[in-house]
Every structure is written in structure tokens, then in C-alpha cells.
Image (cartoon, rainbow, N blue to C red):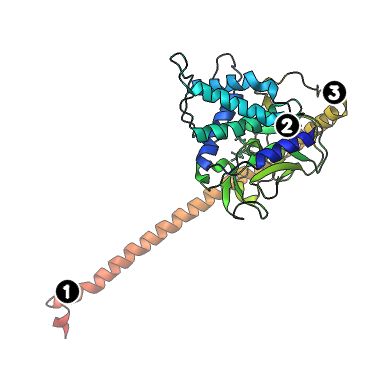
């Protein structure tokens, strides 16, 4: 199936460059619409940490995009790449029709500019790849790091061998570097891409949902040559249900990395599958499930040890910080005392000269 996903990803990767502002807004919009619409009928819907918070549209727009996608969802057949992109165009055309006032209501889509609709088309196609039951990965919600913060993550639907390209986890960089809009997904242009190598961009699309691990990551970003697009490539075997993770590089979190390799937690886990995807291969049986269970047990045991070490370390560091602060205060007080004495001494030295004459200093000659 991956070869079809590869065709779709390559077609999407050669899209004209978007601006950061449109790309981030459209990414927010499509993610919120497809995975977290504010609908009372979906109490499990979760609004994760994502994105640039740049969306200036109503909940109605989100629901309209979601409904329009649902109406066309069956057209997104990942096994037939030739029809796949046409499906995204149909979603766009339906949204354009809904932009026109229809019986007094535009169903909330009038706020979407033409440039935004172009981007929405791209993101609908990109995220429909991970929604497809044929995709090797899916989008879920991950409980991450030391603070058990929730955010989106990408999870394997099936066992994936090491060295495999995950075409469904596609990301693309806009043509400008307005990355201040979303520091959640800054990335540098690589040699061999179609933009100035080394410059910083925002990564948008499903690949931006991949989370970080310092050591036990299982994938890396690779770029699609001569384009602005990236995908994930596994660096080792991954079992069904496991989260796909990469190492963002040392600079990302600095010395306070919250990942489970650096700080202990219960580990990452998928807690919500945001969008119903139809029948799927059961994953709670067979060697893959056993391997995953074994990995979970290993992670839990390791995290237990780390938890103790982490707490000891934190207590030691906090003591050390207190001592250093007290020392600093003492030294400040010493310095202030010294300054006062020095000022007094100077005053005393100056006093006889003042008393002796005109105040210009010449009286002493
Ligand atoms: C590119 S985004 C990854 C997707 C993100 N989870 C989301 O929902 O948008 C990067 C952000 O995810 C969070 N993140 C990634 N890996 C993490 C980890 N291991 N522990 C805690 N937070 C993590 C951090 O907030 C980081 O700035």
C-alpha cells in the first residue's frame, strides 16, 4: 500500500509554496475540524496543545469543514492514488459552494479566502492519509513527558520494519520563515530541497505531530528531494500501537527535556482515537501485541528506577540551589556593606579640604 501512499505524498509535496500565515491557519483549521470539532455529540473530542492558534473562524466553519469531509470521506481511497487528490478538490469545491450564501446562511465558510481554501484542500488531503484505515500510521493523542501533558502524536497501526519510509506522515514547509507563528514545529531547510538551505521554517501537516524522544526514538525526518516536504523513516522495528518518535535535536528542549528518556513518567500512550475510522485490524493479539506488552513492561520498570533517581536528584539540586542562593545573598550583603564603608571613608577624607577654603580646592595652594 505504501507505494500508493508514496504517489500521493509525492504529488502533494510538489504543491506550490504556501505562506506561513495561510499554512498555519489552514493546518489549525483542518486539524481542529477533523479531529477536535467542538460538538456536543463528540464529548471525547480533545483540543490538544497544537498549532499556532491563528484560526479566526467560528465553530460553525469547523463543523462545516468536518461535515464536508465526512460527506466525501469514502472518495479518499489510499489504494487508488489517481483518485485521491481529486477527492480533496471535491471537498474544496463543496466548501466554495457553501461560501456562497445559501438560503440566508453561508454555513460559516465566508471567512475562508481563496488562498486559505487552496491550503485547506492540501491539508484535507494530507490528513486524510493518516485517517485512512490503510495508512500504516494514525493520529492519536499522546500523554507525554514528565508533566503528562496531552498533545497529538503519530502511532503505528501495524508492525513497521526499520528503514521504512512512512509516506503518510507527510509534512511541508511554507515558503517564508514566519516561524514565530508556531514555535511548536520549527525545522531547518536541508541541502537538496527547493529553498535556501539552513533557513528556519515551520513544518506543517501530519509530520508536525510526531513527538520527541532523546534516545529511544524510532524514526527520523527525511526530506523528499527538490521539494519542501519531509516524511518519517523508521530507524528500527516498530510494533503496532507504538508511538512514532524522532529526536528533535539537543537544542529543542535544552537541559530541561521532559521526554520519558530524561524524566520518568508512565510513558507515552494513546488515550484518544479522535476520529472513527471504520473496521481496523485488531492489535490486541499475536506476536506484535506480545512484543508491545513486553516493551511496556520494560518501560514501566525502567521508569520506576528513573523515578527514584529523578526525585533524589531533584532534592539534591534543590538543596544545592538553596545553598547557592544563600551564598549569593551573603556576598551581596558583604558588597553593600563594603560600598557603604568606602563611601563613608571618602566622605571623611574630603571633609578637611572643604572646611579649609573656598570650596574650589584652590584655597589649599
Ligand atoms: C512538533 S510538536 C509535536 C506535536 C504536539 N504534540 C502537538 O500536539 O502539536 C512539538 C511540541 O510537542 C511537545 N512535545 C514533543 N515531544 C514531547 C515530549 N517527549 N514530552 C513533552 N512534550 C513533548 C512540545 O510541546 C513540543 O514543543
Q: Is the CB–ligand 1 distance for label 3 below 8 Å?
A: no
Q: Would you say residue 265 is visible in this rendering?
A: yes
Q: Earlier in the sequence, mark 1 or mark 3?
A: 3
Q: Which residue shows up at 61% across the image and 25% down it?
A: 90
Mark carried by residue 185: none
Q: Is residue 36 above or below residue 362?
A: above
Q: Quadrant of the N terminus?
A: top right
Toward the left, the furthest residue is 358
Residue identifier under label 3:
285
Residue identifier under label 2:
82
Toward the bottom, the furthest residue is 365
Q: Which residue shows up at 70% across the image and 38% down it?
A: 9
* Badge 1 element: helix
Q: Earlier in the sequence, mark 2 or mark 1?
A: 2
Mark carried by residue 354: 1
Toward the right, the furthest residue is 287
Q: Position of residue 58 (x, y in %)?
A: 47, 24
Distance Cα–Cα, label 3 vs label 2: 35 Å
* Badge 3 element: loop
Tag 3 near tag 2, CB within 8 Å: no
Q: Position of residue 286 (x, y in %)?
A: 87, 25
Q: Residues within 10 Å of mark 2 (few under 14, many from 20)?
A: few
Distance Cα–Cα, label 1 vs label 3: 96 Å
Q: Is residue 262 above or below residue 46?
A: below
Give ligand 1's quarter of the image.
top right
Q: Would you say residue 259 is visible in this rendering?
A: no
Count of numbered circles in the view: 3
Q: Is the CB–ligand 1 distance for label 1 below 8 Å?
A: no
Q: Earlier in the sequence, mark 3 or mark 2?
A: 2
Q: Is residue 189 above or below residue 99?
A: below
* Badge 2 element: helix
Amino acid at each position: 500500500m505504501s507505494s500508493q501512499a508514496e504517489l500521493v505524498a509525492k504529488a502533494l509535496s510538489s504543491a506550490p509554496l504556501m505562506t506561513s500565515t495561510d499554512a498555519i491557519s489552514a493546518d489549525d483549521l483542518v486539524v481542529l475540524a477533523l479531529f477536535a470539532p467542538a460538538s456536543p455529540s463528540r464529548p471525547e473530542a480533545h483540543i490538544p496543545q497544537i498549532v499556532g492558534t491563528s484560526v479566526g473562524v467560528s465553530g460553525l466553519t469547523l463543523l462545516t469543514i468536518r461535515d464536508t469531509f465526512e460527506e466525501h470521506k469514502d472518495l479518499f481511497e489510499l489504494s487508488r492514488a489517481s483518485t485521491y487528490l481529486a477527492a480533496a478538490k471535491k471537498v474544496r469545491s463543496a466548501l466554495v459552494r457553501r461560501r456562497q450564501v445559501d438560503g440566508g446562511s453561508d454555513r460559516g465558510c465566508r471567512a475562508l479566502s481563496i488562498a486559505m481554501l487552496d491550503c485547506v484542500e492540501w491539508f484535507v488531503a494530507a490528513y486524510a492519509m493518516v485517517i485512512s484505515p490503510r495508512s500504516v500510521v494514525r493520529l492519536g493523542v499522546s500523554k507525554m513527558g514528565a508533566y503528562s501533558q496531552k498533545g497529538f502524536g503519530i502511532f503505528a497501526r501495524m508492525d513497521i520494519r526499520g528503514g521504512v519510509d512512512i509516506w503518510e506522515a507527510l509534512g511541508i514547509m511554507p515558503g517564508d520563515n514566519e516561524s514565530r507563528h508556531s514555535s511548536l514545529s520549527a525545522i531547518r531547510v536541508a541541502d537538496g530541497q527547493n529553498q535556501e538551505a539552513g533557513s528556519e521554517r515551520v513544518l506543517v501537516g501530519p509530520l508536525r505531530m510526531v513527538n520527541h524522544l532523546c534516545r529511544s526514538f524510532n524514526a527520523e525526518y527525511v526530506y523528499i528531494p527538490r521539494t519542501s516536504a519531509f516524511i518519517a523513516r523508521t530507524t528500527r522495528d516498530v510494533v503496532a500501537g507504538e508511538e512514532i518518535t524522532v529526536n528533535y535535536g539537543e537544542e529543542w528542549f535544552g537541559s530541561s527535556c521532559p521526554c520519558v528518556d530524561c524524566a520518568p513518567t508512565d510513558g507515552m500512550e494513546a488515550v484518544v482515537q479522535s476520529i472513527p475510522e471504520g473496521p481496523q485490524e485488531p492489535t490486541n493479539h499475536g506476536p506484535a501485541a506480545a512484543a508491545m506488552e513486553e516493551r511496556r513492561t520494560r518501560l514501566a520498570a525502567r521508569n520506576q528506577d528513573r523515578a527514584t533517581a529523578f526525585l533524589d536528584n531533584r532534592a539534591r539540586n534543590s538543596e544545592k540551589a538553596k545553598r547557592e542562593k544563600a551564598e549569593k545573598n551573603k556576598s551581596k550583603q558583604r558588597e553593600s556593606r563594603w560600598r557603604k564603608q568606602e563611601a563613608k571613608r571618602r566622605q571623611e577624607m574630603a571633609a578637611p579640604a572643604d572646611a579649609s577654603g573656598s570650596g574650589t580646592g584652590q584655597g589649599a595652594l
